[in-house]
Image: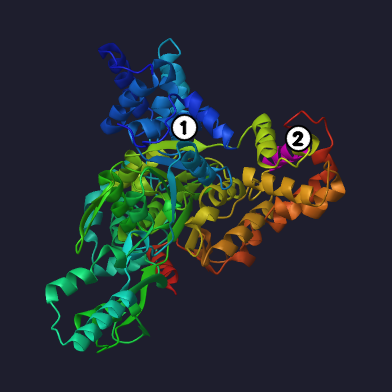
């Protein structure tokens, strides 16, 4: 069973290579997970610290396979009208009034059935992310932060993912010719239902190791010097070991390197680091802690040694 | 691709591995096992590690168990049980012994008369008795009374709407109704915000000094989970953090406490409140479990570590939580003053400080929790 009709890599290694070409460096576990998700047609459930690249992975996957990318951001109170479809009521009324006016002008009575059929036409249907994912195949569907939606929505999502089809009462069944490749992410604010997890491949995304982080920085930010990338990766790696409230993820180290490079820094010195610390640390307590440890200590030390 | 049908022996080995994993505490259900076999077919036998890990595990806690079980099962040699089993007590002790009562055998003898003697008035007396100083018969009655409590938080406004007579105009329903009237805007439909109960998070100290109260408080936690299973979370703290919500979802309180008891590795151990709270905040609280929630910490505040560290964690917690309630059984004792280092450090961050040493005090706690 295959999900994606477009280009499909023949092995996890090949997928990792394709992903690397788009600028996303996946480790063995993530590449295997992505490959299996495509091969077995199962949704992929990704968990991990914020900023380790869960969302970016889904985007890269879409780019590699040449599929459409559809994102559904979950939040509390998300319902069918916002996730699946909605009727465009104002346009329907406009259509109705226009038909009425035309009927009056020509003196003909409106044929009720034709009018009704024209009112519930596909063009008055607004496709929200889930319906878009079923209509634009092949497609990578990212359901971001599924733990933020309510339990009821989970059950509904399960149904859509299992059938890759939905039924709209006025229009009938809409089925995807090839089921979308679904990537679900969660931040574990609450336990997602077992029934949903059971149908997915589960992967915990780790922070990248030192070499991988340097490679990611170089790939993402071509302007950053080698020396700066190495120093930023070293410093963020050390910060992760400091027991901070929010340890910096890859997203933060990319931001930091970009900020430094925007200021024209070619290497990381304590003054530049102090000025840009806000790009990498998002809590005052964390900033205090890092300052107390000493910025110089974070940066000094042999360059190629990733951990203290 | 190197795929192909997996031979019977390989399937047998995989199923055996899944069974091993199940014994170690990972919920490797049959459909997950089936998924693993398909994954091995797709990836080839050399990728058994990832095929199994991606299909059999369901949460981060499963991963270390999986790694250990994998090494034990496929790494050659017999799986050494003790090496990879999660740390759990040999014999789960569910009921915290009420040490200050008479010796166990004496209690057994006087039990029948006690049960018979309980009447409405004794219940009233019992309400204010310290649960640490009860006889066996009284304890059963107290357990029954705790089972009757229904701790529930006050509702808050959610993002969802419901149809209502008064309130803001609901465009979607108004237009839909207009359509049924051939486009005549006959009546405005209105809507109001739905309400939703706040999350309730109970953090129970199960260290040695809290032993006399652990059973009663855990039962209180069970009553809370039973009341609102979807919005209540119970954790135990001591030397480490354990989530017992799932265990407490059993209908029967005794079965629930047994399950919780076998999940808690640090019964009657030491206290490292600051570390356990930090673990809770990092792994659950900050991600959303404590946000806008009513958080109840049940502990005597005997902190081995630095009180300043505990204060820092409580400050973090109080910023996330809607209300922070501290339950200290010693508060019910005459002449008690919160002088213990940890307790004194905690006070500035608390919204409520209650006793919780007797049924009456627990009833008061129910009221405190339900405050809007």
Identify which residue is drawn at 40% across, 64% down: B362
Name the residue that disc number 2 marks.
A230
From this view, report whether residue B345 is shown above or below residue B12. below
Colouring style: rainbow
Q: What kind of element bears circle 2?
A: helix
Q: Is residue B309 left or right of residue B209?
A: right
Using the image, tell me which numbered label, if any, was put on residue A68.
Answer: none
Q: Is residue B185 left or right of residue B240?
A: left
User: Which is nearer the eye, B174 or B221?
Assistant: B174
Image quadrant in which the C terminus of chain A is located: top right
Identify which residue is drawn at 24% across, 88% down: B184
Using the image, tell me which numbered label, if any, was put on residue B63.
Answer: 1
Q: Chief secondary structure of the magenta span?
A: helix
Give coordinates of residue B8: x percent, y percent.
Answer: 25, 13
Chain on which label 2 sits = A
User: Which is nearer the eye, B97 or B236?
Assistant: B236
From this view, report whether residue A302 is shown above or below residue B355. above
Which residues, given as a range, are shown in magenta? A231-242
Chain on which label 1 sits = B
Q: Is residue B107 visible?
A: no
Image quadrant in which the N terminus of chain A is located: top left
Identify which residue is drawn at 27% across, 44% down: A162
């Amino acid at each position: 069973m295959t999900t994606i009709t477009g280009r499909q890599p023949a092995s996890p290694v090949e997928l990792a290579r394709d992903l690397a070409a788009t600028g996303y460096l996946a480790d063995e576990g993530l590449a295997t997970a992505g490959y299996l998700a495509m091969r077995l047609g199962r949704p992929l459930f990704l968990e991990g610290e914020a900023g380790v690249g869960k969302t970016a992975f889904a985007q890269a996957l879409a780019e590699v396979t040449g599929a459409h990318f559809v994102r559904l951001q979950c939040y509390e109170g998300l319902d069918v009208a916002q996730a699946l479809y909605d009727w465009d009521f104002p346009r329907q009324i406009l259509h109705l009034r226009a038909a009425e006016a035309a009927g009056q002008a020509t003196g003909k009575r409106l044929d009720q059935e034709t009018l009704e059929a024209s009112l519930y036409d596909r063009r008055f249907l607004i496709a929200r992310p889930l319906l878009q994912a079923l209509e634009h195949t092949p497609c990578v569907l990212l359901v971001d932060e599924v733990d933020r939606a309510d339990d009821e929505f989970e059950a509904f999502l399960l149904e859509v993912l299992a059938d890759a089809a939905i039924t709209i009462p006025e229009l009938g069944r809409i089925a995807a010719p090839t089921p979308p490749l679904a990537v679900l992410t969660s931040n574990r604010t609450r336990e997602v239902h077992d029934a949903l997890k059971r149908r997915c491949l589960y992967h915990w995304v780790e922070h990248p190791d030192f070499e991988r982080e340097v490679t990611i920085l170089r790939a993402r930010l071509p302007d950053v010097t080698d020396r700066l990338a190495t120093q930023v990766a070293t410093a963020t790696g050390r910060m992760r070991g400091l027991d901070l409230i929010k340890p910096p993820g890859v997203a933060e180290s990319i931001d930091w390197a970009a900020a430094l490079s925007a200021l024209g820094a070619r290497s990381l010195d304590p003054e530049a680091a102090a000025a840009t610390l806000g790009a990498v640390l998002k809590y005052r307590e964390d900033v205090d802690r890092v300052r107390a440890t000493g910025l110089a200590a974070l940066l000094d030390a042999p360059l190629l040694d990733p951990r203290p | 691709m190197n795929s192909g049908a997996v031979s019977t022996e390989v399937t047998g080995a995989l199923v055996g591995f899944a069974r091993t994993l199940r014994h170690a505490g990972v919920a490797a259900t049959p459909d997950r096992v089936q998924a693993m076999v398909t994954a091995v077919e797709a990836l080839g036998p050399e990728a058994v590690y990832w095929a199994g890990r991606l299909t059999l595990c369901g949460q981060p806690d499963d991963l270390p168990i999986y790694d250990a079980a994998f090494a034990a099962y496929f790494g050659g040699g017999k799986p050494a049980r003790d090496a990879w089993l999660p740390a759990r007590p040999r014999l789960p002790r569910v009921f915290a012994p009420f040490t200050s009562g008479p010796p166990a055998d004496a209690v057994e003898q006087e039990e029948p008369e006690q049960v018979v003697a309980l009447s409405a008035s004794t219940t009233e007396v019992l309400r204010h008795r310290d649960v640490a100083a009860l006889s066996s018969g009284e304890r059963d009655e107290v357990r029954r009374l705790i089972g009757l409590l229904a701790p529930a938080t006050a509702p808050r406004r959610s993002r969802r709407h419901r149809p209502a007579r008064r309130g803001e105009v609901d465009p979607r329903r108004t237009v839909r109704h207009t359509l049924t009237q051939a486009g005549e805007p006959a009546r405005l439909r209105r809507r109001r915000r739905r309400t939703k109960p706040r999350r309730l998070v109970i953090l129970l100290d199960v260290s040695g000094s809290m032993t006399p109260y652990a059973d009663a408080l855990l039962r209180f936690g069970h009553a809370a989970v039973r009341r609102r299973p979807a919005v209540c979370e119970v954790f135990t703290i001591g030397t480490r953090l354990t989530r017992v919500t799932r265990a407490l979802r059993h209908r029967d309180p005794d079965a629930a406490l047994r399950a919780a008891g076998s999940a808690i590795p640090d019964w009657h151990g030491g206290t490292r409140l600051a570390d356990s709270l930090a673990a809770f905040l990092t792994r659950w609280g900050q991600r959303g479990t404590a946000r806008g929630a009513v958080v109840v910490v049940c502990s005597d505040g005997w902190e081995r570590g630095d009180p300043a560290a505990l204060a820092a964690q409580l400050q973090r917690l109080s910023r996330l939580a809607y209300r922070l309630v501290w339950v200290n059984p010693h508060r019910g004792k005459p002449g008690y003053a919160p002088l213990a280092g940890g307790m004194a450090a905690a006070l500035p961050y608390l919204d409520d400080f209650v006793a919780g040493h007797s049924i009456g005090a627990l009833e008061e706690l129910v009221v405190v929790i339900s405050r809007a």
